[in-house]
Image: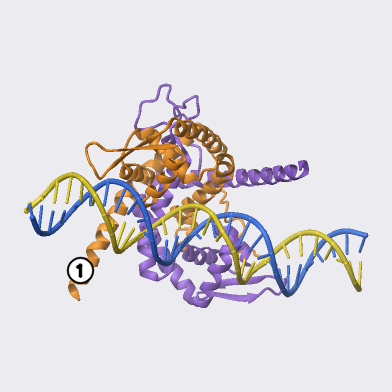
Chain colours: A purple, B orange, C yellow, D blue
Amino acid sequence: MNKKVENMTDRSDGSFFRGHLAPQKSEPDIRDLFSFELQRLAGLSTRIAALSIRPKYGITAREWRALAVLKYLGEVPLQELAKHSGLLKSQMSRTVSSMIERGYILKTANPEDGRSILLKLSPEGLDLSQAILADAFERNENMLSTLSHAERQILIELLQRVGRNSAHYFHDLKTRASQEDLRELDEE
Amino acid sequence: MNKKVENMTDRSDGSFFRGHLAPQKSEPDIRDLFSFELQRLAGLSTRIAALSIRPKYGITAREWRALAVLKYLGEVPLQELAKHSGLLKSQMSRTVSSMIERGYILKTANPEDGRSILLKLSPEGLDLSQAILADAFERNENMLSTLSHAERQILIELLQRVGRNSAHYFHDLKTRASQEDLRELDEE
DNA sequence: GAAATTTAGTTCATATTGTCAACTATAATT
DNA sequence: AATTATAGTTGACAATATGAACTAAATTTC
C-alpha cells in the first residue's frame, strides 16, 4: 500500500536527485530523466530475456508475452489480447497466427459476433507459458536482488501507478494531436 | 463479455505480488512480473516521446538521446558514448554519422589513439538537445504527475539501483553463455 | 429494410530498431 | 616482425512498430 513514501526532501524545481553530481543550480540533465532510466533498463531487460528465452524455447519474448497474457485473460477476442499486451492489433494478429500454427493458441468463432474470434491457450501453450514464466521469475529475482522485499513492492507499485497515469496522458496527447490535424485541414 | 478479467488490473490494496494475498493457491502470473510492467511502460514512454519529438524537431528519440548523453559526457570516443546510451557501437556509429551530417555533432581525431575518434556537441547540437530536454522534462512531469515528488525520487533511485544490478547480471549471463558455447565446441 | 457507418480482424507497405559478423586501420603484446 | 586485440564502419538480416487498405460482419440512420 502506498503511503510510507512521504517526508523525503523535495527539490523545489521538481527535478530528481542525482547520485553523481552535487546539484545546486544545475542545468537539466538527461540522467535526471525518468524516461531515460526507464528506457535503458527496459532495453537491458529485453536483452536478458532474449538470452534465456529465445535459444531455450524457440519463441520470441513477444510471442511468449502473448501466451502469458492470454493465460490470465482466459478466452478473449484478439483486440482484447492486444490491449492487455500493449500491442497494436496488427502486430497481435501476426503473433497469434504464428502461435496458432505452432499449436499454442486455439481459435474459435465468437458466437456472439461473427467478425470476432475467441482465442485461448492450448494445453501445450499453457505448459510452455508456465515453463517460461518460471524462468522469467528467476530472471526478475536476479535483476531485483539488490532491493529489499519492501523496496520491490514499492517499485512495482510506483511503476503501475505511473503506467496507468501515462496511459491517460498518452490518450490525451493523441486526441489533441488528431484534433490539431483536423484544424489544419480546415485551414487549407 | 469476459468476466475472468475484471478487477484484476486494479487490485484494491495496491499490492503487486498476489502471492501475498493468496499465497496458497496462486499460480505465477505475468502481471506479477516486474519486467512485464517495465516493458509496457517503456513502450508507452517511447510512443509518448515519439509523438512530441519527431514531428517537432525532425529527429528520432534515439538520436536525441545520443545528443543528450553526449552533452554530459563532454568529448568522448564513440564506444564511450554507446555504453552510456545503452546501444551497440554499430548502432551508435550510424546514429552519430547522421548527426554529424546534420551538424549537431563534431568529430575530431583522438590524438592519443589513431583508431579512435572524439565526439562532442556542436553549438547547434547543444541548443537542440537543450530544447528537447526541456520538452522531455515536461512529458515526464505529465507521466509522473500521479506521484508526489518524494515518490518520484524514490522511483528513479530504485530504477537506477536495479539498472546497475541488472547490468552486472547481464554481464554474468553473457559470460556464462559464451563459456558454454566453448564447452560445446570442445565436445564435438 | 436498404444505405451508410462502425468495428474486428487480416494483410500490405514501410520505417525503425536490434544483433551479429566481416572488414579497416591502428595499437599493444609476444 | 608476427600475432593479437581494439575502435570504428559497414553490410546483412531479424524483430518491432506504425499506419493504412481491405473483408466481412455488426450497428445505426433514414
Q: From the top left corner, tell me how far across and down residue B95 is, in percent.
A: 42, 47
Q: Is residue B67 above or below residue A85?
A: above
At x 48%, y 72%, the residue is A126
On-image quarter of the N terminus of chain B: bottom right
Q: Quadrant of residue A117?
A: bottom right
On-image quarter of the C terminus of chain B: bottom left
Total count of labels: 1
Q: From the top left corner, tell me how far across and down residue B62 is, in percent.
A: 46, 46
- Drawn side of residue A132 relative to residue A119, left or right: left
Q: From the top left corner, tell me how far across and down residue B41 is, in percent.
A: 51, 49
Q: Quadrant of residue B23?
A: bottom left
In-front residue for pair A13/B60: B60
Q: Which residue is mark 1?
A: B183
At x 52%, y 73%, the residue is A98
Mark 1 residue element: helix
In-front residue for pair B73/A141: B73
In-front residue for pair B41/A127: B41
